[in-house]
Image (cartoon, grey):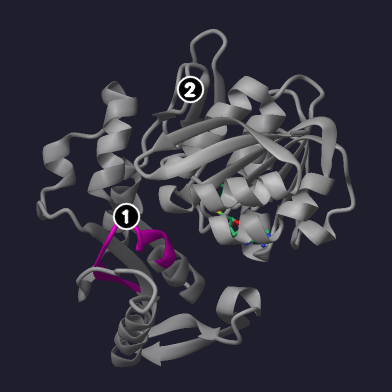
Amino acid sequence: MKWLEFAISSTHEASDAVVDFLTGLGAAGVQVNDPVEFKLLKEASPVDFVDESDMFASGNSTEVDIRAYFSADAEDNILVREPGPFFEQAGYTGKRIKVDLGSLIKMLCDKLADLDNYLDTGSGYQGVREVFEEDWAENWKKYYQTVHLTNRLVINPSWIKYDSAPGEIVVSLDPGSAFGTGTHESTALCAEYLDSTVKNGSKVLDLGTGSGILAIIAALLGAEVEAVDIDPRAVSVARENARANNVDIYFQSGELHDVRGSSYDLIAVNIIADVIIDIMPELAAKLAKEGELVTSGIISDKAANVIAAAESCKLTLISRKEKNDWVAMKFRPGS
Ligand code: SAH
């Protein structure tokens, strides 16, 4: 077996969608070098981060450099997930099919062209090359370093030994195929809210759990946590991450209307503004009287729409935080 590395040049806005597509398609690993995130991380935790000259050894553009790794046989046939209807396993059937290199490149280019109708995807496909397993399996790890989300919340990749300071809460997290490594602004903002809000015994719902990062943080802060994701692959990654952190979380595949519980002290939703607006009445109905709703994943242009939706459900804005055009807000019942 050999490994093929596909290089895609994208933008900060589109990189999550491109990475989702690549992991959905079956990439064994995806490495993202985002100058914007890098800068933020460096500001947040200068001592833990990689050498800048190393990071940009291959270029100095402001575009996001994405590398996706697929395994191939000797004839360059690549095993990918078979594309299916959108709502089936996030756009893929359970089946694996072999495609030749030309077909995979075409699939990549078609998908990027399709995404380009909604988002500026940047320069797109750059090329493909063969790499040796040891190279990529070890190389991409250097871009995931220890991240300090707050004074006491630390996200640490499992392969790094981290000596925690007294009072620190360390989440061991490997970037799997699900969203949420702590490096995205929307996750970091939610984590700050969790840190200041969750109390021992709080009843927390994490809607759109991804890697499980927020659910695990809440559980480590002493909460009783339920977590849900529409993508069953995310739920299995999150379960694995919860196990690695020795926390007990009730995970469920589905959407908010599949959640049986109610009267949550805190609901964290890091999805996107339009989804949050759609489900605002259901969110409001699931909050305890004194409960709090943390919304994130909102680009600043859409914040006012989210506030209006919340107010129409008798929720009041009590706090707002912003990082790099991403907004997170906290609401409470009552006007
Ligand atoms: N909570 C994590 C991941 C956020 S990414 C973090 O803060 O980093 C958003 C997640 O929401 C994705 O895993 C996606 O699959 C999930 N999602 C999107 N729409 C959803 C919906 N309507 N109901 C439940 N989950 C949803």
Q: Identity of the amino acid at label 1? A: Val
Whether 252 is drawn above or below 40: the answer is below
**Secondary structure under the numbered disc 1 in the rendered image:** strand
Q: Quadrant of ligand 1?
A: bottom right
**Secondary structure under the numbered disc 2 in the rendered image:** loop
Observer able to see residue 211? no
Contact flag, marks 2 and 1 (Cβ < 8 Å): no
Circle 1 sits on which residue?
A: 32
Left or right: where does residue 110 sit relative to residue 275?
left
Observer able to see residue 96? yes
Q: Find residue 312 and report its horizontal and vertical position in percent.
A: 71, 49
Q: Identity of the amino acid at label 2? A: Thr
Q: Nearer the viewer, residue 26 or 214?
A: 214
User: What residue range appears in magenta?
Assistant: 1-17
Instruction: Give the quadrant of residue 220.
Output: top right
For disc 1, the neighbor class at 10 Å (few under 14, some 14 to 19, many from 20) is many
For disc 2, the neighbor class at 10 Å (few under 14, some 14 to 19, many from 20) is some
Residue occupying image coordinates x 62% and y 83%: 93
Q: Is residue 7 magenta?
A: yes
Point out the tag, 2 or 1, that comes first from the N-terminus.
Answer: 1
Q: Kindly report which numbered mark, 2 or 1, lies closer to the viewer in this rendering.
A: 2
Q: Find residue 193 and report its horizontal and vertical position in percent.
A: 58, 29
Instruction: Give the quadrant of residue 290.
Output: top right
Residue occupying image coordinates x 48% and y 53%: 302
- Quadrant for the C terminus in the image: top right
**Residue placed farthest to the top in the image?**
166
- Quadrant for the N terminus in the image: bottom left
Left or right: where does residue 335 sit relative to residue 144?
right
Whether 23 is drawn above or below 332: the answer is below
Circle 2 sits on which residue?
A: 150
